[in-house]
Image: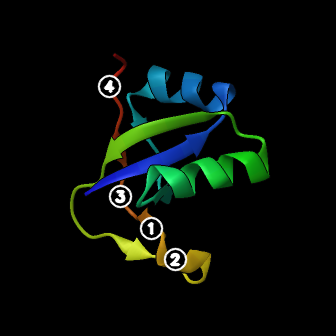
Amino acid sequence: MIVWHVTTAKKLFKYKETGFIKPPVRGWKTIQAAERFSKQTGRSLILRLKFRGKVNVMEGHRGEGVYALSPVEFHDM
């Protein structure tokens, strides 16, 4: 499943160092939902990720928020 992950520059640096994102990894089903969350939280970076395996839906969040309980690989482009 392709999701949009909202983060900060500091966390992005950690993702690059380790090569993965530690769980729980949260994401949004649409870019519009990610942009809305970005504005609400002040987190300016939005990453496109691929969740493999089981994906859980977060309660609330208009059904657009999802999370994975396994690490997600991160490859710098």
The residue at 44%/65% (across/down) is 67
- Disc 2 residue type? Met
The answer to which of marks 3 and 4 sits earlier in the sequence is 3
Quadrant of the frame with the N terminus: bottom left
Q: Is residue 8 left or right of residue 22?
A: right
Which residue position is annotated with label 4?
75
The answer to whether 52 is drawn above or below residue 57 in the figure is above
Q: Which badge, 2 or 3, comes first in the chain's sequence?
A: 2
Q: Quadrant of the C terminus?
A: top left
- Residue 61: x and y in percent read 60, 75
Q: CA distance from mark 1 to mark 2?
A: 5 Å
Dot 4, how many residues are within 10 Å of its Cα: few (below 14), some (14-19), or many (20+)? Answer: few
Query: Left or right: 55 with respect to 60?
Result: left
* Discs 2/4, front: 2
Cα separation between marks 1 and 3: 13 Å
Q: Which of pointers 2 and 4 lies earlier in the amino acid sequence?
A: 2
CA–CA distance in space, label 2 to label 4 = 25 Å
Foreground: disc 4 or disc 1: 1
Question: Residue at the left extreme?
Answer: 53
Q: Find disc 2 in the rendering and name its residue.
A: 58
Vertical side of 66 occupied by 36: above or below: above
Give the label on residue 70, or none: 3
How many numbered tags mark residues here? 4
Query: Residue at horizontal 39%, vertical 75%?
Result: 56
| The label number, if any, that marks residue 66 in the structure image | 1
